[in-house]
Amino acid sequence: MSIAIRNLKEIESLRYPNNIVAKALNKVRDYAKVGVSLEELDLIANDFILSCNAKPSFKGLYGFPKSICLSVNNVIIHGIPDSYKLQNGDILGVDIGVEYDGWYGDAAITFGIGEISKDDECLISCSKEALLYAIDSIKSGMRFKQLSFLIQEFIISKGYVPLRGFCGHGIGRKPHEEPEIPNYIDTSAMQGPKIKNGMVFCIEPMICNKSGNYKILKDNWSVVSEDGLNGSHYEHTVAIIDNKAVILSEE
């Protein structure tokens, strides 16, 4: 496994696409109201990214047909924007990737439309809190599997389970690089590569209610839990600077 070590100049190059990601996420959240279609939100994000002289990096990636991922209710990740119009009580996961000058950014949020249930509020809070907890816990020298273990334990402590089969990842000159960073662990946490200064990667807790086993819907993209219940997803791109994680994907 070869994990890239970035110098400070390269990390600064990664800030701009990640800043665009953060702004695009906020723009989608502002426009996401009852009656607005997922296709409209996709176009809003696409046009904003292009206005920044950047590109939506998900468009065409592995054959994905749209500019951003929009996942409604029980779809946890990789939802394809379509003609569906948002309804009161929906929860919406928004995952956006951006490429600028050969560097990539990536982040995701989940939020409610109108008034949502207390159960969904707790579900969303778990994914966001798990992400921030993970970022605060990172120290240079710890192993990535230790980070996976911490995320898993946090999610379980809140009464949920992590989605299996999908993971966080390195990022830089490609949208997905080494290492893979699951939100769960099946082996010893004291194995595998260590986190080092200059590494840049995405942490993305993906939360299920009862079962972490996944199914992929007929569109060949949308990922749901086999329990059929709602899920939640949050993500940030972070860089390790001076032995701790610094969030790149924020305004």
Image (cartoon, rainbow, N blue to C red):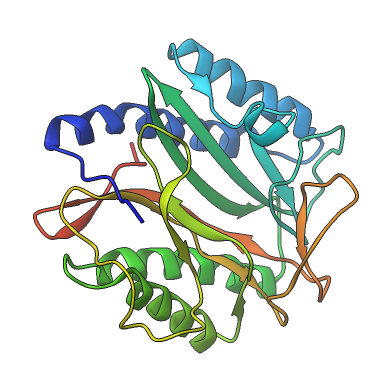
Q: Nearer the viewer, residue 235 or 117?
A: 235
Please count the marks in the image: 0
The outermost residue toward the front is 1
In this view, the residue farthest toward the right is 218
Q: Residue at x 71, y 34 (%)?
A: 64
Whether residue 36 appears in this view of the structure is no
Q: Quadrant of the N terminus?
A: bottom left
Does 178 sit above or below residue 205?
above
Who is closer to the viewer here, 89 or 14? 14
Q: Position of residue 136 (x, y in %)?
A: 26, 67
Q: Is residue 107 visible?
A: yes
Quadrant (top left, top right, bottom left, bottom right) of the C terminus: top left
Q: Residue at x 30, y 51 (%)?
A: 3
Q: Position of residue 112 (x, y in %)?
A: 66, 54
Residue in front for this viewpoint, 59 or 160: 59
Residue at the extreme left of the image, as rendered? 242
Q: Position of residue 169 (x, y in %)?
A: 44, 53
Which image quarter: residue 208? bottom right
User: Looking at the picture, how far across and down is residue 79, in whole percent?
Assistant: 74, 45
Task: Classify 185 as above or below 236.
Answer: below
* Above or below, 233 relative to 41: below
Q: Is 109 situated left or right of 115 in this image?
A: left
- On screen, residue 109 versus residue 34, left or right, reads left
Question: Who's the residue at 71% across and 58% down the image?
Answer: 115
**249 relative to 55, above or below:** below
